[in-house]
Image: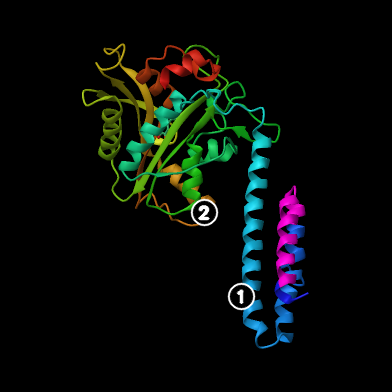
Amino acid sequence: MTAPHALEQLRELALEEIAQATDEQSLEAVRVRYLGRSGRISLWSEQMKTLSKEEKPVVGKLLNEVRGAVTQALEQRARVLQSAKETETLAGIDVSLPGTPVDRGSLHPLTQMLDRAINVFRRMGFALAEGPDIDTEWNCFDALNTPPDHPARNEQDTFYLPDGRLLRTHTSTVQIRTMTAAPPPIRIIAPGAAYRRDEVDATHSAQFHQIEGLYVDENVSVADLKGTLEFLMHELFGPETAVRFRPHYFPFTEPSFEIDVKSKALKGGERWIEVCGSGMVHPAVFEQVNRARGDNAYDPEKWTGFAFGLGMDRLAMILFDIPDIRYFAHNDLRFLKQFQ
Ligand code: DAH
């Protein structure tokens, strides 16, 4: 048999086997049999050496043709097999049926309130700080100049863990954590949950949320505190909002204030509503921090600071006109869907 004749036969054989391949594996086996390293077509390339001068160009050209035809047939067959496989997978599935609608979620009203306030503080250059919900008595009370016999430390008011740690009763713990970790100047806010053993009613919940703030630098004054919190309230509740600083007592600040807001834009607009505790950081707090740090980084002669704790549940209740703090935790969709 002449070389061209043998090649023609090889082509026919290969094309026939390709046409008969019924899946990817058998098709691959055909490819290896003909085009693999020692496949039947590949072997022909090696045999070229043995051919005469006259035969070489003719056979060479034909060999290329055969290789091309077989390669093309393999690709084509692969496509046919692939699409058959897809058709089979989709059999019985009506892709034109409408899908199952997925309800769009939305942010919890408290989260929305936190985000708004955090954005305002960011514009004023406050960085975000964090602390754990479970903390030590020292971070929660001692370092904050709260003596052991202070009523807030009572077991009736605070959730203590068996190991002596507690669920923080305020986010002021993060003030201490931040100062023991880094020297001044400090300008942070710390949003988070706090816990108290309060009798639960429409305005009290065992878990509530605060944004703590702390600003320590040289020459920080009550004017800075006032400016910062007035700006916040005006951004949140509108420029008409009145802000009142009422003298108060906190162990960790001196002087201390409670802050009330009143705005016609809000429901119940003529009433003062208390939203925040605040004051100038007590020198005793700086001294406790210095003792823990083992240095004098917070020298009370050099540094002053203001601090505040905003009641976020209260703020959200005012802004969204929510009558009962317990709604925040009920997870009732009829409630949550009102804040989309
Ligand atoms: N920790 C106080 C509370 O939960 C609020 C507060 C008052 C925070 C004065 C402060 C502050 O940072 O300076 O009632």
Q: How many marks?
A: 2
Separation of disc 2 and disc 1 at Cα? 86 Å
The mark that comes first in sequence, 2 or 1, is 1
- Asked if the residue at label 2 sits under 8 Å from ligand 1, the reply is no
The residue range painted magenta reads 5-27
Element at label 2: helix
Residue 229 falls in which quadrant of the image? top left
- Seen at 78% across and 74% down, the residue is 1
> Is residue 144 positioned above or below 45 on the image?
above
Residue under label 1: 61
Instruction: Please state the horizontal and vertical placement of residue 325, each as a whole percent of the image.
Output: 48, 16
Asked if the stretch drawn in magenta spans residue 240, the answer is no
Question: Which residue is drawn at the image coordinates 46% and 27% (left, top)?
Answer: 107
Given residues 192 and 170, the one toward you in this image is 192
Kindly identify which numbered label has been placed on residue 323. none
- Which is more foreground, mark 2 or mark 1? 1
Which of these two is toward me, 340 or 98? 98
- Crowd class of label 2 (few under 14; some 14 to 19; many from 20; radius 10 Å): some
Residue 325 seen in this snapshot: no
**Is-magenta flag for residue 20?**
yes
Snapshot quadrant of residue 195: top right
Secondary structure mostly taken by the magenta-highlighted segment of the chain: helix
Vertical placement of residue 276 versus 4, above or below: above
Please, what is the three-letter code of the amino acid marked with disc 1?
Answer: Lys
Single out the residue that lies furthest toward the left. Answer: 240
Ligand 1 within 8 Å of disc 1? The answer is: no
Q: Residue at x 50, y 52 (%)?
A: 181
The reply to whether residue 194 is in sight is yes
- In x, y percent, where is residue 307? 38, 38
* Label placed on residue 293: 2
